[in-house]
Amino acid sequence: MLNGAAVMDAALLLIAGNESCPQPQTSEHLAAIEIMKLEHIIILQNKVDLMREEAAEEHYNSILKFIRGTIADSAPVVPISAQLKYNIDAILEYIVKRIPVPIRNYSSDPRLIVIRSFDVNKPGAEVDDLKGGVAGGGILTGILRVGDEIEIRPGIVTKDNEGKFHCKPILSRIVSLFAEHNDLKFAVPGGVGTHVDPTLCRGDRLVGQVLGLKGRLPSVFVAIEINYFLLRRLLGVKTVDRKQAKVQKLAKNEVLMVNIGSTSTGGRVISVKGDLAKLVLTSPACTEVNEKIALSRRIEKHWRLIGWGKIQNGQILENIYLLSIISKYLLNVFLKKKSIYIKY
């Protein structure tokens, strides 16, 4: 949920009718909606086919109590049965009538957050018949077109003998664009077919990466400085007296789970001062200043949401691709001085 929220314009909050409300995961999902400041929410009371009328009404009232005073306070609660497809038409009507199409920025450089990637080649396919990998997600800004030269960051991440990260962005070209089953020449949202090695896309391996035009993407960070805010209480964790446990302050050297866009990575706290903290990431992330992040802590074998923050600064990883461009340019200049011309 925390990863997917990065590309959402609205939210459907699904609550099982045959379980007490709220469940820990439901509380975390509502908190994620508040963190992302999603204004358009529809609450679905599912599995009403398994309940008696009195129980369904009592559960409905518990949902209203749960959302009171939250960002979902005025959201409609629709009783449904996903299994029997009951009231699905009502959900579609709500989406069409209550959720406006957001204003898009088409003039900025395109940027797609990858939330899925896969290999469309069947086992045993001939080499000449192989197709490039597919990346799917939501385009936040700009327009992608068939034929665009693209870059995927952080790309291929490695560590040297000293433990330092190195990243090599994946360079490719868009050969197809799809939204649902529609083949497009340009797109705002949808799936992107590329010339990327399909093994790099297999099994969602590109999830957490950012795709855009070559040389136009944000930097890759290995450490971030954040302005953070902690929740007052732990969601879904109760003490012996059945009260919600308090969220403890960040501690130096503790490891948190950090969600940046569709990226989930670890972050070791190296310093805390007031509402500012510095985190060293366990894997590099392509992001930028002012990006929102979610913070989770390991509690009772589960990662629990404890707060959120905004990136203020950070340590940027040197880009192998950019260094190679500089090297080629210097080589070209050197060779030209020797009266030799080489075209790259």
Image (cartoon, helix red, strand yellow):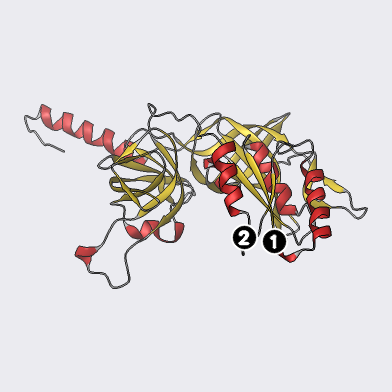
Mark 2–mark 1 CB contact (< 8 Å): yes
The image quadrant that residue 213 belongs to is top left
The image quadrant that residue 203 belongs to is bottom left
Q: Residue furthest right?
A: 241
On residue 327, the disc is: none
Q: Amino acid at mark 2?
A: Ala
The image quadrant that residue 272 belongs to is top right
| Residue drawn at 42 percent across, 45 percent down | 166
What is the quadrant of the C terminus in the image? top left
On residue 82, the disc is: 2
Q: Which tag, 2 or 1, sits closer to the chain's start?
A: 1
Label 2 neighbour load within 10 Å: few <14, some 14-19, many 20+: some
Q: Secondary structure at mark 2?
A: loop
Q: Number of marks in the image? A: 2
Residue 257: give x, y in percent of width and height. 63, 48
Q: From the viewer's perspective, tell me whether residue 223 is left or right of residue 156.
A: right
Give the camera-side residue of 64 and 33.
64
Q: Residue furthest bottom?
A: 124
Rendered view: 319 above or below 125 = above
Give the residue number, with chain letter if any, for mark 1: 47
Q: Residue furthest left?
A: 339
- Residues at marks 2 and 1, CA–CA distance in whole angstroms: 7 Å
Q: From the viewer's perspective, tell me whether residue 290 is left or right of residue 212.
A: right
Query: Can residue 195 be seen from the camera position used here?
Result: yes
| Residue drawn at 63 percent across, 54 percent down | 87
Q: From the viewer's perspective, tell me whether residue 70 is left or right of residue 162.
A: right
Query: Can residue 247 be seen from the camera position used here?
Result: no
Q: Secondary structure at mark 1?
A: loop
Give the camera-side residue of 131 and 155.
131
Label 1 neighbour load within 10 Å: few <14, some 14-19, many 20+: many
Q: Amino acid at mark 1?
A: Lys
